[in-house]
Amino acid sequence: MRLALVLTAALAATPALAARDAVRLKGGPKAEDVLRRFVETSPALKARLAAAAARESALLADARAGLRDSVAAAP
C-alpha cells in the first residue's frame, strides 16, 4: 500500500517524467508485472521514490520525537 501511494505521488508530481517514460496499464494480471518492470528500469523514478521515502521517514521520526516529548512532559 505504501509503495502504491509513493508511486502515485511520484508520477502525479512529475508529469514530464510520466509523459517521457509513459507506461500504459490496461489492467488484468499482467499489469502489475508491467508496472514493476517500469519501476525497476527507470532510474529517475527510482531516485524520486527513494527521495520520497526518505522524506516520509524524516517526517515520521519528527512526529515520534514530538509525541515522545509531549508524553514525557505530561504530569
Image (cartoon, grey):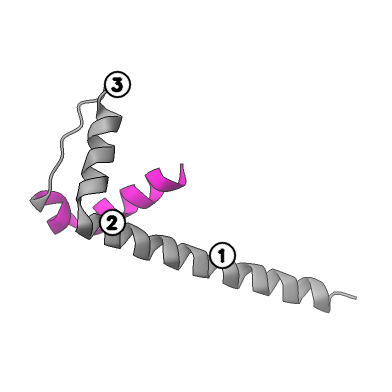
Q: CA distance from mark 3 to mark 2?
A: 23 Å
In the image, what residue occupies the spot 36% across and 65% down? 51
Q: How many marks?
A: 3
Q: Residues within 10 Å of mark 1 (few under 14, many from 20)?
A: few
Question: On the rendered image, what quadrant is the C terminus found in?
Answer: bottom right
Q: Which mark is residue 60?
A: 1
User: Which badge, 3 or 1, is on the more N-terminal residue?
Assistant: 3
Label 2: which secondary element: helix
Q: Are marks 3 and 2 in contact (CB under 8 Å)?
A: no
Q: CA distance from mark 1 to mark 2?
A: 21 Å
The spot of residue 50 in percent (x, y) is 36, 61
Judging by the rendered image, the residue that carries numbered circle 2 is 46
The spot of residue 25 in percent (x, y) is 20, 32
Judging by the rendered image, the residue that carries numbered circle 3 is 29
- Give the foreground label among 3 and 1: 3
Kindly identify the amino acid type of the residue bearing the numbered disc 1. Answer: Leu
User: Which badge, 3 or 2, is on the more N-terminal residue?
Assistant: 3
Name the side, left or right, on which 70 lies relative to 63: right
Q: CA distance from mark 3 to mark 1?
A: 34 Å
Kindly identify the amino acid type of the residue bearing the numbered disc 3. Answer: Pro
Is residue 70 shown above or below 25?
below
Kindly identify the amino acid type of the residue bearing the numbered disc 2. Answer: Lys
Q: Are marks 1 and 2 in contact (CB under 8 Å)?
A: no
Q: Main secondary structure of the magenta part?
A: helix
Q: Residues within 10 Å of mark 2 (few under 14, many from 20)?
A: some
Q: Which residues are magenta?
A: 1-19
Label 3: which secondary element: loop
User: Which badge, 1 or 2, is on the more N-terminal residue?
Assistant: 2
Label 1: which secondary element: helix
In the image, what residue occupies the spot 33% across and 57% down? 49
